Image (cartoon, rainbow, N blue to C red):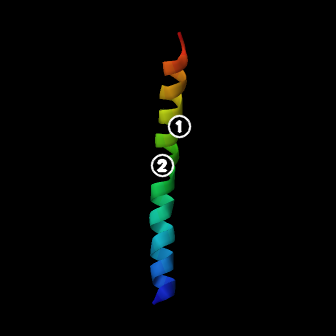
Amino acid sequence: MADICLAKHHRNLGHFLPGLILTALIAAAAIWLGRLP
């Protein structure tokens, strides 16, 4: 039972992580652009 739950968690993480990284990159780019004169 725990193995199934863990596998499901890893699969969700696989979908969630790319979106999180993309959001972080966009936020970093927005901050960097905001610092330009």
Residue 25 image offset from top left, x and y in percent: 53, 37
- Please, what secondary structure does the residue beneath circle 1 have? helix
Q: Could you tell me which residue is drawn at 45 percent across and 56 percent down?
A: 16
Q: Residues within 10 Å of mark 2 (few under 14, many from 20)?
A: few
- Please give the residue where the numbered disc 2 appears in the rendered image: 20
- Please, what secondary structure does the residue beneath circle 2 have? helix
Q: Could you tell me which residue is drawn at 51 percent across and 85 percent down?
A: 3
Look at label 1 and name its amino acid: Leu
Residue 26 drawn above or below residue 32? below
Residue 18 image offset from top left, x and y in percent: 50, 50
Look at label 2 and name its amino acid: Leu
**Residue 25 badge:** 1
Residue 32 image offset from top left, x and y in percent: 55, 24
Residue 28 drawn above or below residue 5? above
Query: Residue at the top extreme?
Result: 37
Q: Alpha-carbon distance for marks 2 and 1?
A: 9 Å
Residue 1 image offset from top left, x and y in percent: 45, 90
Residue 1 drawn above or below residue 23? below
Q: Could you tell me which residue is drawn at 46 percent across and 41 percent down?
A: 23
